[in-house]
Amino acid sequence: MSVSLNVRKAGNYSGDTLDYNNNYLVDVVERVDVAVPVSATNQSAAIAFTMAKLVAIELVAVGVDLTVKTNSTTTPGNTINLKAGKAFTWENDVGLAQPFTADVTVLYLTNASATTAATLRGFVARTS
């Protein structure tokens, strides 16, 4: 069964508003909501997808910055440094290269803060 996904972006600069929507028909939208404790290093998160089936992804570090590694803690396929409150977003029809160099089998999350816990939030939308 297909799911309708609407990705909305908006911005405003000196009274000039930019607001647009991208609509996708996908098979699966997986919600990402993973608690990452203080000083956690390479905490695994069961988030997996194949590059060929990825339609859109959004990841946001809530609380503090997070480091996200794909597939391995020692030789990751990709490393993404997420700034707290700033979305990492990719959609397959925006004309930008796929941000992942290999299929993702697991994510490893690191919270370098010794005082503040974090949460990784977002979604992974894909075809089956």
Image: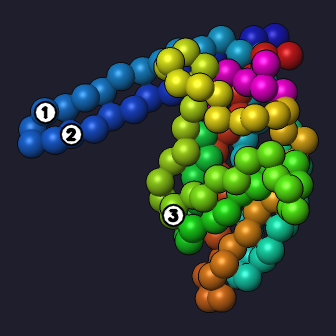
Position above or below: 43 against 24: below
N-term mark: 3 or 2? 2
Q: Position of residue 92 (x, y in %)?
A: 60, 20
**In this rendering, does residue 51 appear at all?**
yes
Q: Residue furthest bottom?
A: 115
- The residue pinned by badge 2 equals 12
For the residue marked with disc 1, what is the amino acid?
Asp
Q: Is residue 103 left or right of residue 29?
A: right
Q: Residues within 10 Å of mark 3 (few under 14, many from 20)?
A: some
Q: Amino acid at mark 2?
A: Asn
Residue 33, position as x, y percentages in the image: 72, 53
User: CB atoms at circles 3 and 2 under 8 Å apart?
Assistant: no
Label 3 and label 2: CA atoms lie apart by 21 Å
Q: Which residue is mark 1?
A: 16
Question: Which SS class for mark 3?
Answer: loop
Say whether marks 1 and 2 touch (CB < 8 Å).
Answer: yes
Residue 17 relative to residue 102: left or right: left
Is 97 drawn above or below residue 39 in the view shown? above
Is residue 59 or residue 93 the one in the foreground? Answer: 93
| Residue type at the position of mark 3 | Ala
Q: Which residues are magenta?
A: 50-57
Q: Is residue 89 magenta?
A: no
Circle on res. 84: 3
Percent coordinates x, y for residue 71 in the rendering:
87, 48
Q: Position of residue 95 (x, y in %)?
A: 50, 18
Closer to the chain start, of discs 1 and 3, is 1
- Above or below for 47 versus 83: above
Q: Are marks 1 and 3 in contact (CB under 8 Å)?
A: no
Is 62 displayed left or right of 27 in the figure? left
